[in-house]
Amino acid sequence: MMDATVLDKLFKTIAARKGADPSESYTAKLFSKGRNKIAQKVGEEGVECVIAALSEGNEKLASESADLFYHLMVLWAEVGVKPEDIWAEIARREGISGIMEKNSRPKE
């Protein structure tokens, strides 16, 4: 069984690509395009996950989910969010009903 350390390792690799040569690294190329393009890629990968879940099977869903994690982590690195911020938020929610957690959020 795998744990979050592989995701932490991936994030470190992604963060190290910030400022690298975009012609030599896809990650650096994403960073060079900025937050809007990175966020767009996260949305595209999310849609691809939905499509895979509905019509393409578990193997394709796993592959698209890996793409989604990767692009989400590029977005985190772009805006300064660290994986430990996410893990802390997940830990904070542990044992709280999803309905209770959602109801505790400020109304927009």
Image: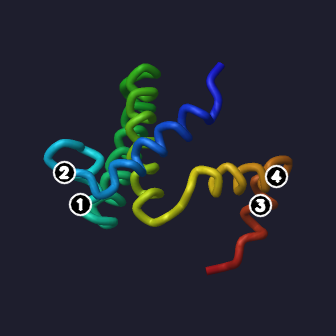
Q: Nearer the viewer, residue 96 or 72?
A: 72
SS for dot 4: loop
Instruction: Look at the picture and state if 108 lies above or below 90.
Output: below
Three-letter amino acid code of the residue under disc 4: Ser
Other residues around mark 1 within 10 Å, as few (<14) / some (14–19) / many (≥20):
some
Q: Earlier in the sequence, mark 4 or mark 1?
A: 1
3 and 2 marks in contact (CB < 8 Å): no
Residue at 44 percent across and 57 percent down: it is 77
Judged from the image, the secondary structure of the residue bearing numbered disc 3 is helix
24 versus 98 height, above or below? above
Q: Secondary structure at mark 1?
A: helix
Tell me, yes or no, whether the two marked residues, 2 and 4, touch with CB atoms within 8 Å.
no
**Of label 2 and label 1, which has the lower sequence position?**
2
Question: Dot 4 corresponds to which residue?
Answer: 97
- Residue 47, given in percent of the width and then of the height, sits at 37, 46
Residue 28 screen position, x and y as percent:
26, 51
Please identify the quadrant where the C terminus is shown: bottom right
Question: Label 1 sits on what residue type?
Answer: Ser
- Relative horizontal placement of residue 99, taking residue 87 as reference (left or right): right
According to the image, label 1 marks what residue? 32
The residue that appears at 40% across and 52% down in the rendered structure is 74
Do the residues under discs 3 and 4 have CB atoms within 8 angstroms?
yes
| SS label for mark 2 | loop
**Could you tell which of marks 1 and 3 lies nearer the N-terminus?**
1
Between tags 1 and 3, which lies in front? 1
Mark 3: few/some/many CA within 10 Å (<14, 14-19, 20+): few
Q: From mark 3 to mark 4, how far is it between C-alphas?
A: 6 Å
Q: Which mark, residue 22? A: 2
Q: Label 1 near label 2: C-beta < 8 Å?
A: yes
Mark 3: amino acid: Glu
Quarter of the view holding residue 33: bottom left
